[in-house]
Amino acid sequence: MDLKPSSFTQITPITPPKVHEVLPTAAPLLSLEQDWQCSLFGRTIYQSQTMMSQIAQEADMAMGITDTFGTLLWTWSSQSMRSSAEQVHFVEGGQWSTQSVGTNAIGVALNTQQTSCVYSNENKMNSVQDWVCYATPIIDPNTQQYYGILNLSTQYTKHSNLGKLAVERCVQLLSQVLQHQQQDTLAMQVFGTPIITFNQNRLALTHRQIEILCILALCPLGMQLDELHYALYGDRDVSLTTLKAEISQLRTLLNGKIQPRCYRLNCELECDFLRAERALNAGYLQTAVHLYQGNFLAKTESPFLRAWRDAFDARLSHHIYHCTNPELLFKLIQHNPERIDAIERLLDILPEDSPYRTSILQQKLEGV
């Protein structure tokens, strides 16, 4: 049989009909966790709400504060904005990521971690195309902990060039309240170079002490001494007395905030790895990528922490495999050039004529 190309029947390709994208008219409404108001950030919002609502009232705007995923935790709207805000679900529980409602100021600030302004018809949803919105991330200036987004919205006929300055000033005021609320707060950034602070003071800890704190953070119900010993050392020949001495030093540094016997952290926790895990649970890859500034305790020999790291990396790889956002993958590779899975996924989705392919291929070869 002749299998030359000319022997095949010529088939005219059929152009599929264009599918018009169905845009939402309001943000999805999600159920908020019942105890979020008891958290450090929740208490901060509660203490700030009178001040924030006065600012929104005087500016004749709608104001909202989200969590790290773009879900509104608190809102307040002036009389002229209230009706339209309720119609588009600019209310508690409204989900305003770009995945949910397309381009909007909260979603852009969420993705870029920078102040954004989305003007009128730049909004993806038709129902808010008469709005101008300003949003900026809420980041603790001392610990660099990311908490969410603060947004100001107004009608396009009333917008001001000072909108970006206004929303950044609101975040500064909120950050001041946040710092006053930080009593008995342990902040842990462990992705990449570990930074541990307690009550905004950086602690000089040994690698082993950081491992202990990470294990206790991942086990909020606490652990018996022998359980903690095995989680930390595995089958290595290290005495219980050595572990007790490490815990005693940590308890002193944390003002007694490690509960004895059943060892448990008895203080406010702000951990990048716990937030990144929750982000993956909710399917928010951009939040996880922002937090993932390097490997989780790359040199740890703890069997418990290595198991957690392997499980997290496997789940992250799953999300990377399904990612279609090249900018997000670029950001991930920038901080983690050894992530071959992200490099391979980026090569899969970049056009063949992309000028970046050569450098990415070279980076892949260097990482293998």
Image (spheres, grey):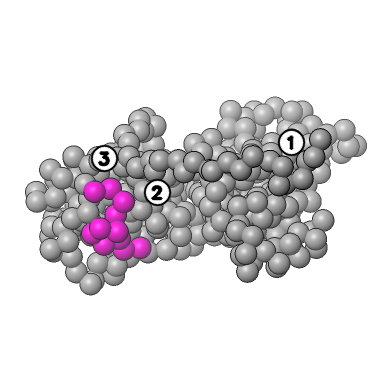
Please tell me which of labels 3 and 2 falls first in the chain: 3
Q: Which residue is denoted by mark 3 in the rendering?
A: 26
Which of pointers 1 and 3 indicates the residue nearer the eye? 3
- Residue 88 highlighted magenta (yes or no): no
Which kind of residue does numbered mark 3 sit on? Ala
First to last magenta residue range? 116-126
The numbered mark, 2 or 1, whose residue comes first in the sequence reads 2
Quadrant in the picture for residue 36: top left
**Relative depth, front residue between 367 and 151:** 367
Horizontal relation, residue 42 to residue 289: left or right: left
Where is residue 275 shown, x and y percent of the image?
Answer: 53, 44
Q: Position of residue 255 (x, y in %)?
A: 56, 47
Residue at position x 50%, y 49% from top? 287
Say which residue label 1 marks: 307
According to the image, label 2 marks what residue?
Answer: 98
Q: Name the residue furthest bottom.
A: 161
Image quarter where the C terminus lies is bottom right
The image shows residue 330 at horizontal and vertical percentages of 60, 60
Q: In terms of secondary structure, where does tag 3 sit?
A: loop
Q: How many marks?
A: 3
Please name the amino acid that badge 2 sits on. Answer: Thr
Q: Quadrant of the N terminus?
A: top right
Q: Few, some or many C-alpha atoms within 10 Å of disc 1 (few <14, some 14-19, many ≥20)?
A: few
x 54%, y 43%: residue: 12
Foreground of the two, 13 or 146: 13
Name the mark on residue 149: none
Q: Looking at the image, which residue is at 64% across and 60% down? A: 352
Which of the two labelled residues, at mark 1 and mark 3, occupies the earlier sequence position? 3
